[in-house]
């Protein structure tokens, strides 16, 4: 059984723990400029949205060249977005997204990724 | 930004009542966390993680959104330095939580605070800070209940393990649409963090820049660029137009750590 990614988990811990600990373990963090706090507040939405958008809109071919992609995944992700915004329930959004893609692929309306 | 101690006195009975409220809230969140942990385990397995790797990620990194992101990065063949940089960016929000908890936990001995730090998540923060504000003083046990209670780290780890083992029983996960879990989870988590125009702008600009840059360079550069430029552009929105200032811990939609 592979354990290569355990090292990645440790490295992820190494960059996450300081964020979690710096405020609890060191005094004076509140003296950082307010704009720094404002910026940090905005990083989460930006990175997550970037990940989602790239994941559904960009595919990388065998030649390593990225290209724009349109597919059923757009519908699924938009449905998840709408459900989470409406119901404040991520799990429900995920279930809906998976169901849309599964049904579309089963009905032959969407390609199954290689 | 930092929560001051409100001038109030609470009895032990009130503290216990507040702990019960905390546990009830944690139980509600745990339902979502179990589901989210399951789909994380499924997605991790689909991306080629072994059960040990998936569970190690949930135990050591213990950061739901970043873990989901890492699954996508690994599946997409992104180099580790890129994964680590994006993890750091994604988890930078914990600085806010940690700084906000300090006034309530500063009397706790340093070694225990060091352990507490690993357990700071969107949920443990939201549960514990609400508890502290209800009772108007610190309560170390309350923090531990938030961090290792029903919606805590052990639930997340067990749900991950269940998801990984379940995934092994599914022969063709793509046919079931498992591959869409990652982008759907990312957008759902982003929605949970959007509490005003600035956050919305950061998300839209981040997404747009990421796709644009990814198409002309590569995917990892696109994501990093979007993640850095989105917030910068959003900061240009004057404060008076940024209705609904973001409040750490208002992340009802993210059920995992």
Image: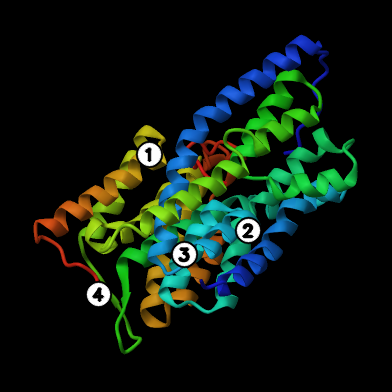
Q: Earlier in the sequence, mark 2 or mark 3?
A: 2
In the image, residue B224 sits, relative to residue A95, either above or below, namely: below
- Residue B71: mark in rendering: 3
Q: Please tell me in which quadrant of the rendered image residue B103 appears.
A: top right
Q: Which residue is mark 4?
A: A114
In the image, residue B27 sits, relative to residue B185, either above or below, namely: above
- Badge 2 crowding class, 10 Å Cα cut-off, few under 14, some 14 to 19, many 20 or more, is many
- Badge 4 crowding class, 10 Å Cα cut-off, few under 14, some 14 to 19, many 20 or more, is few
Q: Secondary structure at mark 1?
A: helix
Q: Are marks 2 and 4 on the same chain?
A: no
Q: Please tell me in which quadrant of the rendered image residue B240 appears.
A: top right
Q: Is residue A24 left or right of residue B81?
A: right
- Residue depicted at x 36% and y 78%: B215
- Residue depicted at x 63% and y 33%: B149
The residue nearer to you, when weighing B35 against B89, is: B35
- Residue depicted at x 78% and y 21%: B136
**Cα distance in 3D space between marks 4 and 1:** 31 Å
Tell me the chain of label 1. A
Tell me the chain of label 2. B
Q: Are marks 4 and 3 in contact (CB under 8 Å)?
A: no
Tell me the mark number nearer the camera, choosing from 1 and 3: 3
Q: How is the image coloured?
A: rainbow
**Cα distance in 3D space between marks 4 and 3:** 18 Å
Q: Which residue is mark 1?
A: A85
- Badge 3 crowding class, 10 Å Cα cut-off, few under 14, some 14 to 19, many 20 or more, is many
**Cα distance in 3D space between marks 2 and 3:** 13 Å
């Amino acid at each position: 059984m592979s354990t290569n990614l355990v090292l990645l988990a440790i490295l992820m811990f190494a960059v996450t723990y300081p964020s979690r600990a710096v405020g609890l373990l060191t005094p004076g963090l509140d003296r950082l400029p307010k704009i720094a706090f404002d910026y940090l507040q905005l990083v989460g939405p930006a990175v997550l949205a970037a990940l989602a958008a790239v994941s559904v809109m960009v595919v990388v071919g065998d030649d390593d060249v990225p290209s724009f992609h349109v597919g059923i995944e757009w519908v699924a992700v938009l449905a998840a977005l709408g459900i989470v915004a409406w119901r404040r329930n991520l799990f429900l959004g995920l279930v809906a997204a998976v169901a849309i893609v599964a049904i579309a692929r089963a009905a032959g309306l969407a390609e199954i990724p290689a | 930004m930092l929560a001051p101690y409100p001038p109030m006195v609470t009895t032990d009975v009130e503290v216990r009542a507040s702990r019960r409220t905390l546990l009830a809230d944690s139980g509600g969140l745990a339902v979502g966390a179990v589901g989210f942990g399951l789909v994380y385990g499924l997605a991790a397995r689909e991306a080629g993680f072994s059960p040990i790797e998936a569970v190690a990620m949930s135990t050591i990194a213990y950061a739901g959104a970043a873990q989901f992101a890492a699954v996508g990065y690994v599946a997409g063949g992104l180099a580790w330095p890129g994964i680590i940089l994006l993890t750091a960016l994604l988890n930078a929000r914990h600085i806010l939580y940690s700084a906000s908890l300090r006034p309530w936990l500063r009397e706790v001995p340093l070694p225990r605070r060091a352990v507490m730090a690993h357990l700071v998540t969107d949920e443990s923060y939201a549960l514990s800070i609400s508890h502290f504000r209800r009772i108007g003083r610190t309560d170390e046990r309350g923090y531990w209940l938030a961090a290792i209670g029903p919606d805590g780290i052990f639930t997340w780890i067990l749900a991950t393990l269940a998801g990984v083992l379940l995934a092994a029983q599914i022969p063709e996960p793509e046919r079931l649409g498992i591959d869409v879990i990652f982008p759907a989870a990312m957008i759902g988590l982003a929605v949970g963090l959007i509490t005003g125009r600035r956050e919305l702008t950061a998300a839209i600009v981040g997404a747009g820049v990421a796709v644009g840059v990814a198409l002309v360079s590569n995917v990892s550069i696109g994501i990093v660029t979007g993640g850095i430029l989105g917030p910068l552009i959003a900061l240009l929105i004057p404060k008076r137009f940024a209705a609904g200032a973001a409040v750490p811990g208002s992340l009802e939609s993210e059920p995992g750590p």
